[in-house]
Amino acid sequence: MDFLKKTVLAKLAAAGALAAFVSAPSYAALKDCKSKPESWLEVNVTGFKDRTGDVSVELHPDIEGDYLDKLVGRVRIETPSSDPTVCVPLPEAGKKYILVVLHDRDKNNKLNVLSDGFGFSNNPKIGMGTPAREKTAFTAKKGENKMTVILNYVQGLTARPLSEDEVARDQKRRRVRR
């Protein structure tokens, strides 16, 4: 692995949300958003490399500095056979939050930047580290909030969403190995 690729991966790993699943309140996934709090976020997660492992949807406050250091709450589910919609309680309408979605493919509660997927609210382009909070923050409104997060996987020197061809090629490779 060349120096530039190691540097990119080190910056991604040091980015906090991508490096560890820190302790925070865990919310039970709200089934079909039926038991709704005052404000909630329906997160549609797309772009999966495969249907293995778990999906962790984390809510962070929009704060100065490393916004991923503080965690408001987390919803963790097994990766379903189709793109999930996960309901996340929002503590307070009118406040800004940042959402991080992690696809922990091997269920080890640790990020493997070479295989696990990740995405942020507002789907910013991922470069050599955590996206700027200004690009990821959203304001919670009272009642229903909706968002789609597209997962990114490290491809070469950057992280980006996978194309349908890449997903099909990867699935075919896994079938041949079995």
Image: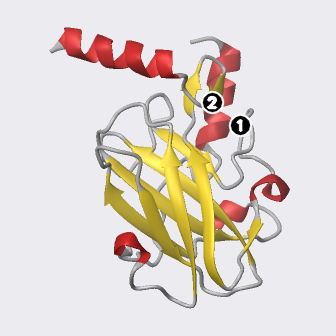
Amino acid on which disc 1 is placed: Ile
* Residue beneath the point at 58% across and 56% down: 100
- Quarter assignment of residue 150: top right
Q: Which residue is mark 1?
A: 126
Q: Do labels 1 and 2 touch, CB within 8 Å?
A: yes
Percent position of residue 99, x then y: 62, 61
Label 1, label 2: how far apart the Cα atoms are? 6 Å
Q: Secondary structure at mark 2?
A: strand
Vertical arrangement, residue 156 with respect to residue 34, above or below = above
Residue lying at the far left in this picture: please name it: 178
Disc number for residue 82? none
* Residue beneath the point at 48% across and 64% down: 22
Q: Is residue 172 left or right of residue 146?
A: left
Q: Look at the image and tell me in which quarter the C terminus lies.
A: top left
Q: Is residue 177 left or right of residue 84?
A: left
Percent position of residue 88, x then y: 50, 72
Which sits earlier in the primary sequence, circle 1 or circle 2? 1
Q: Which residue is mark 2?
A: 159
Vertical arrangement, residue 164 with respect to residue 20, above or below = above
Pick whichever, 155 or 175, lies toward us: 175
Amino acid on which disc 2 is placed: Ala
Percent position of residue 59, x then y: 58, 68
